[in-house]
Amino acid sequence: MNGNRWRRVGFGVGGLAALAVLFLAVVMLSNVGLRGMRADLTQNKLYTLSKGTQQVLRELKEPVNLYFYFSRDAAAKQSPLIMPYAARVREFLEEISARAGGKVHLQVIDPQPFSDDEDRAAEFGLQSLQHGGAGEPLYFGLAGTNSTDGRSALPVFTPDREEFLEYDVAKLIQELGTPKKPVVGLLSSIGLQGQFNPQNGQMGDPWPIYTQIQQLFTLRTLTPDVDHIDKDVDVLMLVHPKQLAPKTLYAIDQFVMRGGRVLLMVDPSAGADLSGQDPSNPLAAAMANHSSDLQPLLAAWGIDYDPTKVIGDLGRGLEVRTNASSAPVRHIGILGLRHDDMNQKDVVTSSLESINLATVGSLAPHAGAKTTFEPLLQSSASAEPLPAQRFSALIDPAMLRDGFKSTGVRYTIAARITGPVDSAYPNGAPGEQKPTPGPPIPHLAKSTAPANIVVIADTDFLMDYLWVQTRELFGQRIAQPFANNGDFIANVLDNLSGSSALISVRGRASFSRPFERIEALKRQADDRLRAKALELQSELQQTESKLTELQAKRNDQSSLMLSPEQEAELKRFTAEKTRVRKELRETERGLDVDINRLGAWLKAINIAIAPLLVAVAGVLILSMRRRRRKDAKAAAAGTL
């Protein structure tokens, strides 16, 4: 009897040991055999490639090699907090490689100090995160090559770009897969490439913004009377378009109908517009019209814009000097936008910190428009539209504040327009339009692809004084930016010149999610604490006021002794102050209790839920096996 009992115990222990060994074997095999196979259960589908990225991979014309450099040991010692983000980056790159159909080859490299891998990382332009010259170099970046020796790199992955991880990687892959520089067609009534100055009779130097665009893109200048825009133009850049001929407007309209992308800059009062300048008549320029518009195209694109209004912004107005000897004065027409005034969900503005503009207009969605209107830059709420004439020949900027009344509205200064667009010329080309040489081009009444247009209601922000300082160094002119105006233009052109697939890859949700319940508890407690603090401050002011009144009523003003009334008032305030402080402590203690209670529940769920599910699964499997055995025995007995 005892032997049978011990035999059963031995079988049970052996079975548990066998199950443990089997469990470890399954885990090890799954890590190897099931690597890359996963179900994305995250709330925001962080590990699922967007349709745009999948299209970028399908459209690759040649293989791309990716080299993910990550110094694991150095990161574990110096910056352990980036380890989870590095794991996400690696898994994302592995997902891209797996979905690219053999067109993306990924290598994960852990560069050791003084190794060939470290030297190659430096050749790619990757940046070490090592600080202060101490410790091993820490590389956390991505480099890529193609079959034609083309190179591109993301020097370092930073947490502040986490939401745009997919966009940055997809953009790098697309650049390597299609190494040709995008073509930007420039049509401008302002001489960005250098214009004749009638006051000194000389040609000016190219603007820094023009030089920057030339370095990044293939820049093609278009004449103001152009009647056709070539298909190889990736982005049409319109700067201060004034009094364009109907044939030019129609060419722009049909460019958009064909799926062309547009960067448009209009201005109600362009400071760089030299029209009307006459050295013999200084008032001629002040009387000239320095505004620009693009009707009827703006209306067709679903945009409302008034070229006669300039936004005055008391909250974002910068201080300027009218001359060297005068004190600084706030100019509500020259604005300094901050990070919070920019769309942090759009890739072209998410990483920018400051943009300076002058005499800006405002944009708004047209009622009933089919397009989507997405603000990129906005004024503060302390703004008001002012007549553009008030900025002509302005001598004292302080005069702009006369009669100024904030409307409480945040006006849109720059916006992205996307979606289907109808032609502004539904009946075809304007009446006197001459046919272009070559085969006839069919008229398009509707866009063949969703439009993607960025409109900026300012051109002055391209001028040097608002974003860059130029100085001489060893005979060369060096431009040093102090604002992100140039970065904004480069980002927009870079974004628009990508494929429609890349444009659709916007910022994803952050990988690191906050504890929303805990944050809500903290906000509630903070509201209570703030209310108590205001209550205490109010009582303090009332008491001080009462003490002042009592002091004024005293007969002996030279005495430093407190009167009985003052003594009683002080005692009352001291007791009240003690009571409020006690309530503050109780509120803080209550916050801790709520958070600790929530934490205890989370721990209990995390600790108990997995074993409970395993136990339930085990019981179900055991009961099913016993039922099968019982059914088998019953069937065997029936056959006998």
Image (tube, rainbow, N blue to C red):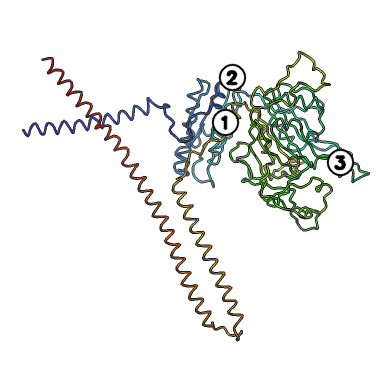
User: On the image, which quarter does residue 172 sit in?
Assistant: top right
Work out whether residue 345 or residue 389 is closer to the camera in this orientation and state it: 389
In the image, residue 261 sits, relative to residue 139, either above or below, namely above
**Outermost residue, front direction?**
368
User: Which kind of residue does numbered mark 3 sit on?
Assistant: Ala
Q: Which of 416 and 220 is in front in this view?
A: 416
Q: Which of marks 2 and 1 is nearer the N terminus?
A: 2
Residue on which the image places disc 1: 505
Q: Give the mark nearer the N terminus: 3 vs 1.
A: 3
Precedes in sequence: disc 2 or disc 3: 2
Q: Nearer the viewer, mark 3 or mark 1?
A: 3
- Identify residue for label 2: 61
Mark-to-mark CA distance, 2 and 3: 52 Å
| Coordinates of residue 477 in the picture (x, y in percent) | 76, 40
Q: Which residue is drawn at 53% across and 38% down?
A: 162
Q: Name the residue under label 3.
A: 288
Q: Position of residue 175 (x, y in %)?
A: 61, 27
Q: What element carries label 2?
A: loop
Is there a contact, CB below 8 Å, between mark 2 and mark 1?
no
Disc 2 residue crowd, few under 14, some 14–19, many 20+, Cα 10 Å: few
Residue 479 position in % (x across, y down) = 72, 41
Question: Quadrant of residue 401 in the image?
Answer: bottom right
Q: Is mark 1 on a helix, strand or loop?
A: loop
Return the residue nearer the eye: 597 or 465: 597
**Is disc 3 placed on a helix, strand or loop?**
loop
Amino acid of disc 2: Lys
Occupied quadrant, residue 146? top right
* Other residues around mark 3 within 10 Å, as few (<14) / some (14–19) / many (≥20): some
Q: Please state the horizontal and vertical placement of residue 312, each as a whole percent of the image.
A: 73, 49
Relative placement, left or right, of 579 versus 201 is left
